[in-house]
Structures are given as structure tokens and as C-alpha cells.
Amino acid sequence: MTRHLLDIDDLTPSELNAVLDLAADEYPPHVLTGRGVALVFQKPSARTRSSSELAVFQLGGHPLTIRADEVGIDERESAEDVARTLSQYHAAIGARVLDHEVLVRMVAVSSVPIVNLLSDRAHPLQAIGDLLTLRSHWGGNLAGRRVAWVGDANNVARSFVLACAMTGVDVVMATPPSHRLDQATVEEVAEFGGNLVQTSVPEEAVKEADAIYTDVWVSMGQEGESVERLVAFAPYHVGASLMGLAAPGAVFLHCLPAHRGEEVAAEVIDGPASLVWPQAANRLRAMRGLLLWLFS
């Protein structure tokens, strides 16, 4: 059976831990020798393209990046036909798309694994990289740790919260009431046995937190909502005073790109508590670990 990764819950908790273990291997076997991996980008990318291409290369394969204008999903040809065609040449297809449903349609017809490189609903490889970062910093054991998410309950947050539930990490989310997680995700967290609390008060969320995580307030495609969002999220700025309310030794996470002075203060993201750059580096290991798991 062909396995796909559209969100982190396409893995079981034990499979997620297996991916994390494989991702830590700095000298992985060349499981992709002589094979290609298509990387389709509807949206611009910095970390995702670099990490994905290098992961495929380090596993002995050939990465082929395809821009939006080269393939024209649902303009030049349908998402289904793109998947059917690319699966004739490649061992796997990674896709960074505007609409998550495009990935669902590709999975329905593809004969090779489809990997979500980001959609409007999920960012599973970011979640894997985040767990790798925390596991490395905390010495491997994640269970019982507490992370505060401050800001928008967006696609990154959704995948991260599910990943935390699968690995025993408690999460407290501070978001405006109109920007909280959907109920289906909350219920899924409970099914995994996760401990999730939602509040509108960031000071409550960060109390005794071992890590504080935030993301931009206005993502690509949300520019038309920027005025409303900047007002709604202004109380959720992560500055030194908010970090000071967390547990001693608490660390800071951000998936990047960051807007210093908006969601986070420069003194926080560039300060000694920041794990942002190890977090970015672990995107490579995350992709490598997933591909190892898929093809080992």
C-alpha cells in the first residue's frame, strides 16, 4: 500500500517516533539511488525547497523542482493529471499548494507517495522539524513538557498541536476567539490523548511553559486581511516580558519567515532563548527522515 503524508496524523504515534529516530541519522543509506523526486511549488519557498532538494540528494536521489507556471495545476492541466504524469517518472511527489484539497485529489490517483510541503490546512514537515528541535534540546524525552502557542491557530499550529498530542507534549494556545483551532482538530487531539487548553490570554498560556511558539500574523494569501489581523493579534506579541513569565530556561520557536516588531521582538528571536536556527536546520532532517521511513 502506498503511504502518503498530507498531515502529521497520516502517521501513527509509533510511526512518527520512527521518523524522528530516522531523521537523526546524519549518515543515511542511499534509499533513492537512481530515482527522482518531483517537488511542485504553487507558492514561493526558501526553507522548504532547500531542505527538500538536499534531503533527496543526501539519500542518493535526484530532486526536480517544478514551479507553478511550469505545471499550471488546474489551469494548464488538472491536479489529477499532474499526479498521474509525475508518478510515471518519480519515486515520490512533494507539493506545496494553495488549497489542501489539491493534495487530496492527487493522492486519489497517484501510484507513488504524495508529501505535503505546505498547504492552507497543514504543514507536517514543519511539525516534524519542531519535534526534532525540542527533542534535541531537551535530551530526547518530550512527554510531559509544556508548550505555549501564541497567535494564530493556523496551518502550522494545527500540525504542531497534533504532533504534540502524539508525543505526549501538553499545549496551551493563546489566540483571539475568532482565530482558534477548528473543533474537529480539538477532538482529534483528545483522541490521541493530548492535553490541549485554549485561552485568549497570552499571559495565562505561557505560565510554566517550557517553550513559546509563534508565527506570522499575516501569511501568504492573507494580505487582504492584514489590517484586521494586525489589530486582532496586537495583544499576542511575544516580547521579553512575556518570555519572562515562562518556566526558567524556556525556549522560543518560530517557523519563519519572521516579522520582527510584529509577532515577536527582535530581542527574543535573536536572543539566547531562541532555537529558531536549529529549528530551520531540522527541516532538512525532517524531510530526510520521512523519505527514509517511506523507502527503507
Image (cartoon, grey):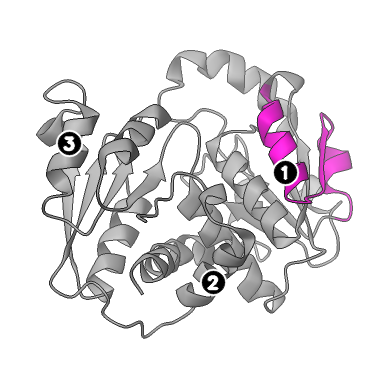
Identify which residue, 96 or 271, lies in the foreground: 96
Q: Which residue type does callout 2 highlight?
A: Ala
Residue 96 appears left or right of 57: right
Q: Residue at the spot x=64%, y=66% of the render?
A: 134
Q: Are marks 2 and 1 in contact (CB under 8 Å)?
A: no
Magenta-highlighted residues: 179-208
Q: Indicate the quadrant where residue 74 lies.
A: top left
* Separation of residues labelled 1 and 3 (CA atoms): 33 Å
- The picture places residue 176, in percent across and down from the top left corner, at 74, 24
The magenta stretch spans residue 24: no
Residue 222 showing in the rendered view: yes
Residue 1 higher or lower than 54, as above or below = above
- Image quarter where the N terminus lies is bottom left
Q: Nearer the viewer, residue 197 or 277?
A: 197
Q: CA distance from mark 2 to mark 1?
A: 20 Å
Using the image as rendered, state which of residue 36 and residue 243 is in the foreground: 36
Q: Which residue is mark 1?
A: 189
Labels 2 and 1: the sequence-earlier one:
2
Crowding around mark 2 (Cα neighbors within 10 Å: few <14, some 14 to 19, many 20+) is some
Amino acid type at image mark 1: Val
Secondary structure of the residue carrying tag 1 is: helix
Which of the two discs, 3 and 2, labels the residue nearer the N terminus?
2
- Name the mark on residue 18: 2
Left or right, 100 with respect to 181, comes to left
In which quadrant of the rendered view does residue 43 lie? top left
Magenta segment includes 184:
yes
Q: Considering only vertical position in the picture, is 246 above or below 152?
A: below
Residue receiving disc 3: 82
Q: Amino acid at mark 3?
A: Val
Q: Judge the density around disc 3: few (<14), some (14-19), many (≥20) Cα neighbours within 10 Å.
A: some
Element on which disc 2 rests? helix
